[in-house]
């Protein structure tokens, strides 16, 4: 069974927390009720293979599942997704957590990077043009990439590309996985636009993006904004990080 961190009200790591599993179930981490606690007498039909934990009401109010995993038809894709980057008014911030993304347009240039040859970035031009327009207009585009201590080939490729991102005005920062875990950041990718529209990104196991789940629930948005604030505060800027981790 694999767990995906959903959220915590601990404020600094540990319990209480909620996780989603790959078995379409949820795991709640809380305080175990001691065997001599009188409350255990009120538990109904507790089997030997089961246990009970205590969690604050706030945890379930903020992180209890409100709906099943969105269907593909509910995910924003294509030009509808791209419009988010054209239409935001002030800020677009992202948390990136995967070690590999499978993006069809960049596969050829990724192979070129791995082979050590010149890298054709023609496919990258539309994104960079959009970023230049937005940042020249005074808008902010920023992201934190959560990375392991040893970068994967794809993360080195992303670091290679980040030079162009930053030249186009993006603020790219890097946060080591161990520190992200200490900060209890979620294991999922998302964009937050203007601090009110959340786009949770869904991927296949291979890293191909399925689409974006749009969330505007204020409580959920605020929690993701808090995670972003913590990530940006502790992350290192591209210019500093790349000196210690040259992509080639």
Image (cartoon, helix red, strand yellow):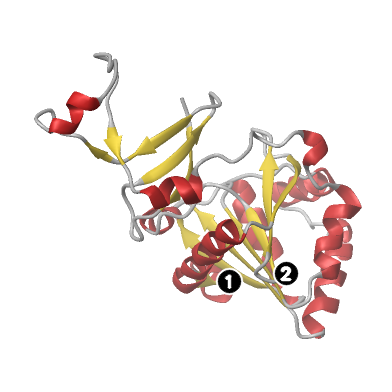
Q: Is disc 1 surrounded by few (<14), some (14 to 19) or many (20+) residues within 10 Å?
A: many
Q: Position of residue 239 (x, y in %)?
A: 57, 75
Q: Is residue 245 visible?
A: no
How far apart marks 1 and 2 lie (CA) works out to 10 Å
In the picture provided, is 141 more to the left or to the right than 11?
right
Q: Position of residue 180 (x, y in %)?
A: 43, 57
Q: Indicate which disc residue 185 carries.
A: none
Q: Is residue 27 visible?
A: yes
Mark 1 near mark 2, Cβ–Cβ under 8 Å? yes
Q: Nearer the viewer, residue 95 or 69?
A: 69
> Toward which corner of the image does residue 96 lie, by quadrant?
bottom right
> Toward which corner of the image does residue 209 lie, by quadrant?
top right
Q: Which residue is mark 1?
A: 238
Q: Nearer the viewer, residue 10 or 210?
A: 10
Q: Which residue is mark 2?
A: 165
Residue at x 68% of width, y 34% of height:
204
């Amino acid at each position: 069974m694999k767990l995906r961190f959903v959220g915590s009200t601990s404020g600094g790591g540990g319990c209480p927390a909620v996780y989603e599993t790959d078995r379409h179930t949820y795991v709640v981490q809380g305080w175990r009720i001691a065997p001599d606690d009188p409350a255990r007498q009120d538990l109904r039909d507790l089997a030997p293979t089961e246990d009970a934990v205590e969690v604050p009401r706030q945890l379930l109010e903020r992180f209890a599942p409100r709906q099943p995993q969105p269907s593909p038809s509910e995910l924003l894709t294509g030009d509808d997704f791209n419009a988010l980057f054209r239409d935001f008014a002030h800020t677009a911030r992202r948390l990136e957590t995967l070690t590999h993304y499978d993006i069809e347009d960049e596969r050829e240039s990724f192979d070129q990077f791995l082979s050590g040859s010149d890298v054709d970035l023609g496919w990258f031009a539309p994104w960079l043009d959009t970023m230049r327009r937005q940042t020249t207009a005074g808008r902010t585009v920023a992201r934190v990439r959560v990375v392991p201590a040893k970068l994967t080939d794809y993360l080195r490729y992303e670091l290679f590309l980040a030079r162009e991102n930053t030249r186009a005005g993006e603020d790219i920062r890097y946060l080591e996985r161990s520190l992200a875990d200490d900060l209890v950041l979620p294991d999922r990718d998302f964009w937050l636009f203007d601090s009110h529209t959340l786009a949770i990104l869904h991927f296949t196991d291979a890293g191909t993006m399925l689409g974006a789940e749009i969330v505007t629930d204020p409580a959920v948005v605020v929690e993701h904004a808090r995670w972003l604030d913590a990530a940006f505060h502790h992350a290192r800027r591209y210019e500093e990080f790349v000196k210690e981790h040259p992509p080639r």
